Image (spheres, rainbow, N blue to C red):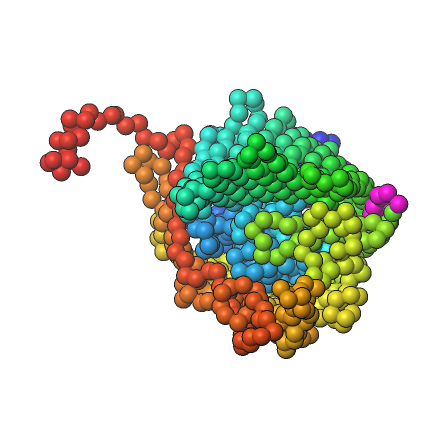
Amino acid sequence: MISLLTGNLNTFGQTRVSGFVKDKNSGETLIGAYIFEENTNNATCTDNNGYFSIQVKQSNSLLITYVGYEKYTFHNPDKDTIVHILLNTSNKIEEVVVKSNRTLDNNIEQLSTQEINNIPSLGGKPDVLKTLQLIPGIQSQNEGSSLLLVRGGDPGQNLYLIDNVPIIYVNHLGGFTSVFNPDMINNIEIYKGGFPSEFGGKLSSIVNITQKEGNISKLKGNLSIGITDASFSVEGPLKFKNTSFILTGRKTLVDPLMILASSLSDGGDYIVSYGFHDINGKFTWKPDAKNSFYINIYEGDDYLNFWSNTKDDITNEKSRLLDIWGNWLISSRWNRVVSTKLYNTNILSYTRYRLKNKQTYSISGNNEKTDFKREYLSSVSDLAFQSKWNLKINNNWNLKYGLQSSYLLHIPNYSYQTNTSSQGVNERINSLESALYFENKVNIYNKIDARFGARLVNYFTKDFSNTAFEPRLSFNIKLHNKHSVNLTYMNVNQYAHLVFTAGDIMSNEVWIPAGKQIAPAKSNQYSIGWNSYFYDEMYEAKVSLYYKNMNNLSTYKEGYTSIMGDANWRSKVETDGSGIAKGVELFIKKNYGDYTGFLSYSFTNATRKFPNINQGVEYLFEYDRPHSGSISVSRIINNNLTFNAAWIYQTGLPYTPAIGRQYTPSTNFNEDGETYYFEAIIYGKRNSARMKDYHRLDIGVNYTTITKRGNKAIWSFSVYNIYNRHNPYYYYYNTDNSGELYNPATWNEYKSLALYQVSFFPLMPTFSYKVFFDGSSNKKRQKTPFKQKIINWLYYKN
């Protein structure tokens, strides 16, 4: 099914066909649909907007294909045309032979919602970032963490985009789960290197998430509950013509349980509560075939609360601690088909992340009262505008260009405290980061796809400015229809550094801007790869080699884990660091058949070097894991039952070993006025030892059923770490296994010191239940009288 807009006749016997490919029932854009000109090698595919543009002979037809949908043939008119093609879903999965014209890129991986749902997860619900960690070259920070470490990079070197708008904080529960709701996601692209020129600002990766637009035909949605949270999703058309919406939300279930448990313990003197929530919405309006308008919103927070109230006959003591962290986003976007050759996107957005700590304390008695209050805030705000243009000059030459500008406000360290005359400095750092970019994509004799472009970036703040030219090169050389070699180079700059305390449930993620004392980070990355398809595209394979150098890195100085409340916070930041990461990656994927899945492996070596850390000597990166591998298998047993399994292996993390002990004089004295001595550990070379290797097996089963009301429902059962491997979360030294990091002995006693391991995630069975609803699924049922229900039950009439 199509709708048409036509333009002027092409005098050269060719016409240009542009437009969109969508699902006929829901109206969702189909990303990666292929459009082929019959009897030729001329082909293209839809982008993240479902848009395509192709020049064809006037007499030829076009074939449109997408896996899981019926093929569609479009008979080309004799004029330049803008079309809206609607595809019907198909129960039969057909593999289209001409699909082999597509090429793979070693630096890009794509995930669909179905692939995310096929991975067993710790909480019984799919997690986007944990699924990405199974891809070669991408690792987790620690067990259970959703933070991404890409090709030896830091967690703060990844750019996360929701419909091309950056989101700053992407985790809940200290990294235990990500903020992205799979119900909202249409497609995910992750770039590990070879960034297109339109992307920049982060050194290691781009995670580009395209959200759904909402069903245009009917109101539908779902409700889901698991062991950690409950969630909902609702979408459908609005009364205003050509409009749709989608809204999702999620909330933890443990908050009231923690309040109840803590209030019943220790006489109810204190109450503890933790929780998180997020809400995500999108509004779409398409007034005509050429224009589309979108509004996106996101808001999500984590919060940890502690209340205490103790009383006796004389005094009443109250205290309150609140930690809250998260971000919110609002954006508007206008997509416009200017002509059959030119496509334009304009985006205006505002994003804010903040980490806030608030403490209050009061004590009263004997007609006296003392109050104390302290507040801490760290935040970053980004007001941005983007204008992107895509010009299809001909079938062999595509030009992208545009501009991006962000007005940023950083508050790294605001603090306030009563009962003190000297208050912390409320430093507000304004900066402007702007970029112009262009990128040419040229096809040379149907053998070489060359992509070359650049970004011109300017960063300006008080007393500091920087202008950088960032070249980008990519060559994809076809050795055969199903074999190609990919070569890339990129240069990128990052103008904000992330410093954080690892393993802390309360986010200590603090963003600090570049300036006079803290230079912007820089990186160069080179990669080469081989890509191939086998057995009618049942299998695809990639092998990649990469080398990345990073300069002007920043981290905490040794002995510091926070800048909270320090007006001279820059003195706690170690700068002028460098890093090198190099590795080999292997990825084999089975696309269809009784069993589907993938195998991934990567070998990585990542190092760091700072002037005042490890005596200026290069050392292994804290999260260096030389060997990482995973195997994921999915099996559709029948229409109602699917089985999934994932096995993960990683080399153990490095740690700094103890090589001796010594007595050290204290600045305090004992009761007799004598010098007090305590024992201190002597450490060896930084990160020169390794923890035990990490591995585990997760399995999951999804069972689809129909409720009594005629609604589709899915039960998901999973077992995390099925063979109960005790993987180390961290090591610590002590004279016993009390769990404390170190319990020093005094001068008059001696106890042997040992190395102990802490593990957090044993075998853990989990489940979730998800029920779907739409206007056609509910059955009209007559209400059965109570008396008849009793008779039915007594005589087994049900």
Indicate the position of residue 72 as horizontal and vertical percent values: 53, 42
- Specify the segment rendered in magenta: 457-463
Residue 238, percent from left and from top:
53, 25
Q: Does residue 107 appear in this view?
A: no
Identify whether 125 is placed above or below 594: above
Residue appearing at x 46%, y 38% in the figure: 313
Quadrant of res 778:
top left
Chief SS of the magenta region: strand
Q: Residue at x 46, y 30 (%)?
A: 219
Give the x, y percent position of residue 38.
61, 48
Q: List the single residue furthest toward the left.
A: 795
Q: Is residue 467 magenta?
A: no
Residue sitting nearer the eye, 265 or 110: 265
Quadrant (top left, top right, bottom left, bottom right) of the C terminus? top left
Which image quarter: residue 49? top right
Residue at 67% from the left image edge and 56% from the top image edge: 561
Q: Please state the horizontal and vertical placement of residue 644, each as a whole percent of the image.
A: 42, 58
On screen, residue 761 above or below 383: below
460 in the magenta segment: yes
